[in-house]
Amino acid sequence: MNKNLIKITLVLLMFSVMFFTFCTDQYENHALAFRNNTNDSIQVDRYYNTSIRPRTIMIAPDEYGKFYETSSDMWVTPQVELEKICDSLVLTGKVNNKNFRIRFMADDTENYCISPFSESADWELEVIVNEKPKFLGKTLERFNIHIFDINTGCITTE
């Protein structure tokens, strides 16, 4: 009886290891980003209604910079998520050797042709999937990056 119990235990252990080897943990991340299509770096300041100090990032020319990331299971459109995370965005930089200051709010836009808050705003989706091995199985991490382009043709300088 002991030999049968040992054989059954070994078989169960082998099947368990095989089962867990094929298990995959999956994570989903979302981000909002601006793509800088100007010739100079731009600064993005994200303001909250509860703070006077913005969160600031710099974005190099021809690059995109993420200004918000979340691993929340619930995700809505970029416009709705933007309204949830900030009151306004201020972008500053230079275009054609002139300084510009763009301000985006849910109900107002200054010095740009369309607001990222607008339902008609065009957000590009870039998906990056990273696969990492783990002891038993693997981990898949999916990044959904929603990118809003900042184009020189839409910027109004003062």
Image (spheres, rainbow, N blue to C red):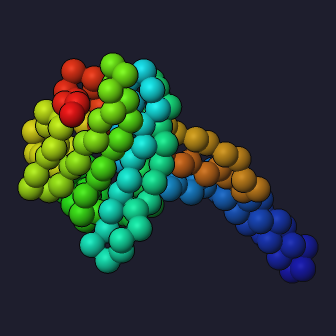
Q: Position of residue 15 (x, y in %)?
A: 71, 59
Q: Nearer the viewer, residue 97 or 17?
A: 97
Name the image quarter holding residue 106: bottom left
Name the image quarter holding residue 95: top left
Q: Where is residue 5 in the image (x, y as percent from the top left)?
A: 83, 76
Q: Which of 117 and 129 is in front in this view?
A: 117
Can the viewer see residue 79?
yes
Name the image quarter holding residue 148: top left
Please name the residue shown 32% across and 27% down the image: 98
Please name the residue shown 18% across and 55% down the image: 105
Q: Where is residue 132 in the image (x, y as percent from the top left)?
A: 67, 45
Quadrant (top left, top right, bottom left, bottom right) of the C terminus: top left
Q: Nearer the viewer, residue 18 or 91?
A: 91
Please name the residue shown 41% across and 68% down the image: 53
Q: Where is residue 77 in the image (x, y as percent from the top left)?
A: 22, 51
Can the viewer see residue 29?
no
Q: In this view, does 20 lie to the left or right of 9?
A: left
Q: Which of 26 and 74 is in front in this view?
A: 74
* Whether residue 61 is situated above or below residue 14 in the rendered picture: above
* Whether residue 89 is situated above or below residue 84 in the rendered picture: above
Q: Is residue 102 left or right of residue 135?
A: left
Please name the residue shown 78% across and 69% down the image: 8
